Amino acid sequence: MIILQGFQAIVWLMIIPYLLGKFITSKDEEKNKMLYTWVIGTCIQMGIFFVLAIPMILIRFKFQTLRNLYFTIIVILCMISIWLNRGKIIKISKFNLKSISIFQIVAIILTFLQVFIIFKYSNINNDDSSFVVLSNQMIDYGEMYYYEEGSPLNARRALAPISAYYSTLSQYLFVHVTIFTHTVFPIVLVILANVIYYYLGKTLFKEDKDSPYIFMLFMILANYYFFRIKGAGSYFFRFTWFGRSIVAGMLLPLLWKISLDCMNKEKNKIKDWLSLLFVVLASCLCSEMSVAIISIPIVILTIINSIRDKKLSYLLKSVGVLIPCLIIAICYLIIR
């Protein structure tokens, strides 16, 4: 059973996100973007769930219907990705031991230490009575964000259905949702966050080989020591499974990285705007606070870069990217 659970975890948390990410990164000329493909694919995986979950929750479908539909769509998309990218699923350039720097070694060691600490010293929080209990209720009773038959919708949680996402993945992995949220998923999220820090550093320091790793080390240490318990970094490390933690510790840095790519005169490719859209969808899945937290930096960056590059297209594309935030805001006002 443990072997099956481990295999399912690899499939759903690594292989499937990678295959989904290939829809956007398959034509990238840059080599060794496997990890970035995995990051983008994770956002796509979360974004697709969000798009399916919101209407099905509001119409009051059963949890099992959402779980089965999501499974079917993901399998179909993965089969299409394999067919489209046949012969080029994995691209790895020659590995040169001489190119490894001390900063790379330290970054890898710190990442493994983080994973070990999360696995060994998993903790709990009072908000588990919301996140984890809701997930268990969906599995046991089939209702999504309704306490009982005829009860009103729990709008605050329903419009950021991260608990339903946890329920769904825990069912696919054959593990209890508490184990999934406290141990399995946090390990993956911490690794993803560190990969994002690296790629953000790579965007900021384009030509320097070591600077992305130095920036990654800085971000890891900042998460540990620069803020108190309620700071974004330490909160992400201690309570990784919280939706707001995922937004602050992982998705916001990714948003900045992709936004810099989107509003780059030399690049400005449609795939970057699609990536940004899936980051917005993944953020909305995690927390209702994303309506403001995600919208504000995108709006500010768009205004600054539109003036700098004299491009109205940035404004139009940003409006399209922020449509999910607008829809959720309207739904919240109506339901409330």
Image (spheres, grey):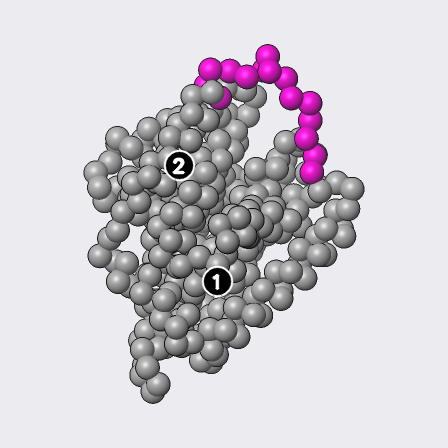
Magenta stretch containing residue 215, yes or no? no
Q: In the displayed image of the protein, which residue is found farthest to the right? A: 87
Q: What amino acid is at disc 2?
A: Val
- Give the number of the disc on residue 171: 1
Q: Which element is circle 1 on? A: helix
- Give the number of the disc on residue 115: 2
User: Which portion, as a residue range, is magenta?
Assistant: 90-104
Q: Is residue 203 left or right of residue 243?
A: right
Expressed as whole percent of the image width and height from the top left, the position of residue 25 reads 65, 43
Q: Which element is circle 2 on? A: helix
Q: Is residue 296 left or right of residue 16?
A: left
At label 2, counting other C-alpha atoms closer than 10 Å, the crowd grade (few under 14, some 14-19, many 20 or more) is some
Expressed as whole percent of the image width and height from the top left, the position of residue 107 reads 44, 25
At label 1, counting other C-alpha atoms closer than 10 Å, the crowd grade (few under 14, some 14-19, many 20 or more) is some
- 168 vs 185: above or below: below
Q: What amino acid is at disc 1?
A: Gln
- 305 vs 166: above or below: above
Q: In the displayed image of the protein, which residue is found farthest to the bottom? A: 150
Quarter of the figure with residue 143: bottom left
- 124 vs 310: above or below: below
Does the magenta stretch mainly form a helix, a strand or a loop? Answer: loop
Identify which residue, 334 or 26, lies in the foreground. Answer: 26
Expressed as whole percent of the image width and height from the top left, the position of residue 184 reads 42, 48
User: Can residue 306 be seen here?
Assistant: no
Q: Residue at 61% of width from left, 37% of height from top?
A: 34
Assign the C terminus to one quadrant of the image: bottom left
Q: Residue at 55% of width from left, 55% of height from top?
A: 45
Identify which residue, 21 or 313, lies in the foreground. Answer: 21
Q: Is the Cβ of the residue at disc 2 closer than 8 Å to that at disc 1?
A: no
